[in-house]
Image: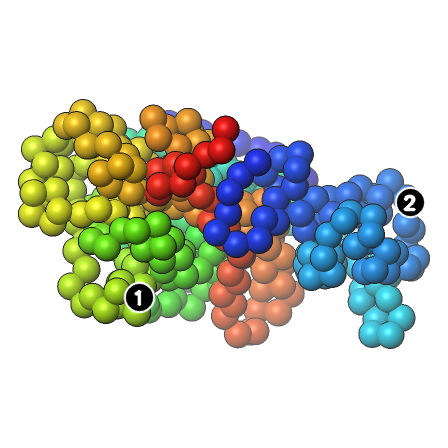
């Protein structure tokens, strides 16, 4: 895929370990990459049969379910065809028209999550003959809405084939801006695939395809984990004007509190968590022994403030976040978090986009990519090292 840029200014788990020994990629992704390399290098040519699931299970020392996931990803990217009773065969390469897409992420460059999703789109085999343009802001909240609107206008003027859009968050006008962008692209007849989040208030959904993780489940899993680690008075901390994904995480947080602790009043606090007076006031009022944060950035800021006022993590308060950003393991207390398979999100987004272009009247898709709980010391886990 051609690339163009237009600037605007050993780990513990709560469940089975699906991570490869040589990195952070899930095992099914490692198998996918290896088979992809072998297909592209001609080890398996068009029409040839791939090794059976049983053979690959032995080769990679994994379960049949893991191999099946790798095959599903290859099939999703139109690289193989699965024939019941016969096996899995390499598809003949199709002749695709070269298309030009726009990536509309106003805070690209300030979020390593979206940078990894962008890389997933670029590296997707389905994107091989296409090109992608993107832009980014200075990272200031006041710029986000303006940059998003300008990029939208640029893409409409360029008549791009489709737009990958991560709705604006944190700006006071984000809901109005996001709806305006969606309406303009819709009017221009440009397909749009939402990355990570919808712009409608949770649990409402727009009529655009979406690829991300199940954020309700993420909130539930994090809360359940803190409860299992002994927390009984858990609050949810979020930055004001956060994306609707955070509202979904709050819903999961509340459900876990109710179903596992029988609690109906589950405190949710919003604010500037670098403000020591505010944080002290929250602690005095709520007396939490656990905190689920809307994302890792919120957790990092809050952890630093808690340390400054003498609160120990995890001895006094157990903490968790979402995203598994690059610095999460290097915080003063390594952070328990939810890891998103960003490469898989990007690859799936490209596949969904091409399907939408080929079949514009098909039902709206919501594609959830499985996320993984990464357990570290902030939630009370004691490393053996």
Q: What's the residue at 13%, 32% (across, down)?
A: 275
> Mark 2 — residue?
43
Is 289 on the left-hand or right-hand side of 60?
Answer: left
- For residue 242, say whether it is visible: no
Q: Is residue 314 left or right of residue 278?
A: right
Q: Are marks 2 and 1 in contact (CB under 8 Å)?
A: no
Q: Which label lies toward us, 2 or 1?
A: 1
Count how many numbered circles sit on residues in the image.
Answer: 2
- Element carrying mark 2: loop
Q: Residue at x 44, y 31 (%)?
A: 329
- x and y, in percent, of residue 154 in the image: 44, 42
Q: Gap in Å between the C-alphas at discs 2 and 1?
A: 51 Å
Q: Is residue 104 above or below residue 54?
A: above
Q: Which mark is residue 260?
A: 1
Q: State the residue at coordinates (87%, 74%).
A: 85
Which quadrant of the view contains residue 67?
A: bottom right
Q: Quadrant of the N terminus?
A: top right
Q: Neighbour class for label 1 at 10 Å: few (<14), some, many (≥20)?
A: some
Where is 287 relative to 308, above or below? below
Tell me how the rendering is colored.
Answer: rainbow
User: In which image quadrant can residue 52 be found?
Assistant: bottom right
Q: Secondary structure at mark 1?
A: helix
Q: Could you classify mark 2 by the number of other residues whose Cα lies within 10 Å: few (under 14), some (14-19), or many (20 or more)?
A: few
State which tag comes first along the sequence, 2 or 1.
2
Residue depicted at 90% across the width and 44% down the height: 42
Q: Residue 306, image x and y in percent?
A: 20, 32
Q: Nearer the viewer, residue 159 or 152?
A: 152
Depth order, front residue of 96/174? 174
Q: Compared to 133, does 79 lie above or below?
A: below
* Residue 146: x %, y % from top left: 30, 40
Left or right of 105 in this view: 40: right
């Amino acid at each position: 895929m051609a690339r163009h840029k237009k600037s605007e200014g050993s780990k513990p788990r709560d469940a089975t370990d699906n991570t490869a020994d040589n990195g952070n990629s899930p095992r099914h992704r490692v198998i996918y990459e290896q088979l992809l390399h072998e297909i592209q290098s001609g080890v398996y040519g068009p029409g040839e049969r791939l090794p059976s699931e049983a053979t690959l299970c032995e080769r990679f020392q994994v379960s049949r379910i893991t191999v099946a996931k790798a095959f599903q990803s290859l099939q999703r990217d139109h690289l193989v065809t699965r024939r019941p009773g016969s096996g899995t065969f390499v598809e003949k390469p199709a002749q695709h028209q070269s298309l030009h897409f726009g990536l509309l992420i106003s805070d690209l460059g300030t979020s390593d999550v979206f940078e990894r999703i962008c890389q997933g789109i670029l590296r997707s085999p389905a994107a091989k003959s296409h090109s992608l343009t993107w832009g980014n802001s200075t990272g200031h909240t006041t710029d986000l809405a303006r940059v998003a609107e300008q990029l939208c206008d640029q893409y409409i003027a360029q008549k791009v084939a489709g737009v990958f859009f991560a709705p604006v968050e944190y700006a006071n006008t984000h809901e109005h801006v996001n709806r305006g962008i969606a309406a303009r692209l819709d009017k221009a007849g440009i397909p749009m695939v939402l990355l990570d989040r919808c712009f409608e208030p949770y649990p409402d959904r727009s009529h655009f395809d979406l690829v991300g993780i199940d954020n309700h489940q993420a909130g539930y899993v994090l809360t359940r984990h803190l409860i299992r680690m002994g927390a009984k008075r858990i609050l949810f901390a979020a930055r004001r004007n956060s994306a609707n994904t955070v509202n979904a995480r709050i819903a999961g947080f509340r459900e876990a509190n109710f179903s596992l602790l029988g609690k109906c009043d589950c405190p949710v606090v919003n604010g500037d968590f670098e403000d020591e007076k505010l944080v002290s006031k929250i602690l005095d009022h709520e007396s939490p022994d656990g905190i689920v944060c809307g994302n890792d950035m919120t957790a990092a800021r809050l952890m630093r403030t808690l340390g400054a006022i003498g609160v120990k993590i995890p001895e006094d308060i157990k903490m968790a976040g979402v995203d598994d950003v690059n610095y999460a393991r290097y915080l003063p207390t390594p952070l328990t978090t939810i890891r998103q398979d960003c490469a898989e999100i990007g690859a799936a987004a490209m596949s969904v986009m091409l399907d939408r272009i080929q079949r514009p009247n098909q039902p709206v898709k919501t594609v959830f990519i499985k996320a993984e709980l990464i357990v570290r010391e902030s939630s009370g886990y004691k490393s053996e090292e």
